[in-house]
Amino acid sequence: MASSSATVQTGDQQAGPATHVGLAMVVVMTGVLITAVDTTIVVLALPTIERTLHIALASVIWVVIGYLLVITLLATQVGRLGDMFGRVRMYEAGFAVFVLGSLLCALAWNEGAIIGFRILQGIGGAFVTANSGAVIADLYPPQQRGKAYGYNAVGWTFGAVLGIILGGLIVTYISWRWIFWINVPIGIGALILALRVLRERAVRTSRRLDVLGMVTLGLGLFGVLWAMTKLATSSLTGSVVGYLVGGVVLLGLFVFVEFRQSEPMLDLSLFKIPAMAPSMLASLFQGLANFAVLFLVIMYLQGARGLSPIHASLLLVPGYVVGAAVGPYAGRLADRLGPVVPATIGLGIQVVALLIHAQLSLTTGLWLVVVASIVNGTGASAFFPANTSAVMKASPRETLGISSGMLRTFGNIGMVFSFATAILIASRSISRGLAFAIFVGSTSLHGDLAAAFTTGLHAAFYTSVGFMVLAALLSATRARSAGVRTGRSAGHGASAGQGASAG
């Protein structure tokens, strides 16, 4: 390397030429982008997948939930593998698995195949998302990470935009299989670039996997989610009660196991770091409140208003575009002011967006959907980079992978339950079976039924408002930590192994 090359300092070591750091950031953003694409693009394809592969109505949502659930379960474990065997290596392995899963999803032939291959795709997505935050932390010094996470948020937002647009176009004019085929060339190109520009910079740490914790959490979440999705299409039965009770018992067992593990799946000792617990819980409740919004709005536009997938998707694009523009500025603001202010304001803005969504009716101008989407995108882009940056600053360097994975786990648990909670609440005003059919896009409503269903959507949005307010209150409590008020000093404390703040 030429001696005149600019370098970026990361704590006790150099990250290398700034141009290489920029390329590395492009690779990380691409990984986040393609996983974000598959979080949103599948929503618009659900009805077509259901019809083509003859999937039972009650099973088709597992095409989405299965993907999210496996990412939730693996987030901390693959972050731990990153600490053990190299974050870059695990990140690149995630790319390879994600591309393979996408290819197989495109070739799926029945219900079991598409759900199974989506789970494989989710395994790859877990390796990518759980290690991306730690890779960025290795690339940038603490005082610059907010900006970096802002750009990473752009990758997620742009991916969500592509998912919405491409989902509408592909489902309407081509074939649902192409929502998976498009990941293959993008993923291969990004993997080749990653192999060329990403380098390991962190010292590897010996760790143990928490298999028992992962199994008890996985089975517990599955039991509760299975019961909730069954209740969305049928009445309460002994089987549903059994799954629900069994899931709750297993979740309790999971907590019991975690307190007795030398290296637990969720390292609760990290919560001793000032403001870490509110940060993780704010992420959980933000996911619980916000992830359902996409599905609820799609239900409203396609079910109650009768729009086609492409027309429904286009109304949501402006919010993602504005969110992408706001992300980097919000990240810089977090670097200057610390994480509490931008994160809490972002959550407050999302509360306003949810209140706007709750005013939608059968006669409301569709421009209100656009306005609500823009407000929501702005708030989300203010929250995510600040929250992620501060958690990474607060985390000791040797546990960056674990902290990144834990943050993703809490967020994903919220997202998974947001999905199920939304359909349960929204279906209270009409028959469960009909509401579920609207949810996956199999039918639309007219007249009194449409009005009744819109009332159910209002209840779901107001429930999300409550969750988002709780997230904002948790975020605001972090101001009590002295380190929070100075984001830079918190970052230096984290790099020395002492957490001072979390965002």
Image (spheres, helix red, strand yellow):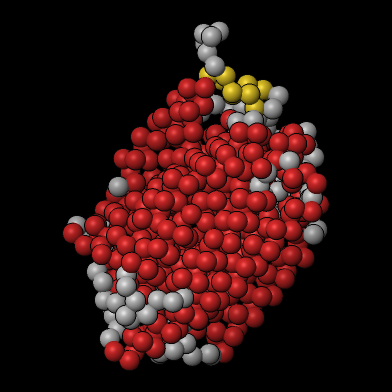
Q: Is residue 312 left or right of residue 78?
A: left
Q: Is residue 502 left or right of residue 302?
A: right
Q: 342 or 11: nearer the eye?
A: 342
Q: Residue at x 65, y 51 (%)?
A: 341
Q: 178 or 344: nearer the eye?
A: 344
Q: Is residue 503 left or right of residue 442?
A: right
Please state the horizontal and vertical placement of residue 58, each as a whole percent of the image. Answer: 41, 78
In the image, is residue 473 above or below residue 498?
below
Q: Is there any visible trace of residue 414 in the rendered image?
A: no
Q: Residue at x 46, y 60 (%)?
A: 375
Please state the horizontal and vertical placement of residue 253, each as a whole percent of the image. Answer: 73, 69
Q: Is residue 489 left or right of residue 217?
A: right
Q: Quadrant of residue 395?
A: top right
Q: Residue furthest left?
A: 173
Q: How many marks?
A: 0
Please state the horizontal and vertical placement of residue 405, each as a whole percent of the image. Answer: 62, 49
Q: Residue furthest top?
A: 3
Q: Is there any visible trace of residue 455 in the rendered image?
A: yes
Q: Residue at x 80, y 58 (%)?
A: 260
In the image, is residue 145 above or below residue 353?
above
Q: Residue at x 67, y 22 (%)?
A: 13
Q: 364 or 319: nearer the eye?
A: 364
Please state the horizontal and vertical placement of residue 432, each as a whole percent of the image. Answer: 42, 86
Q: Quadrant of residue 177?
A: bottom left
Q: 499 or 112: nearer the eye?
A: 499
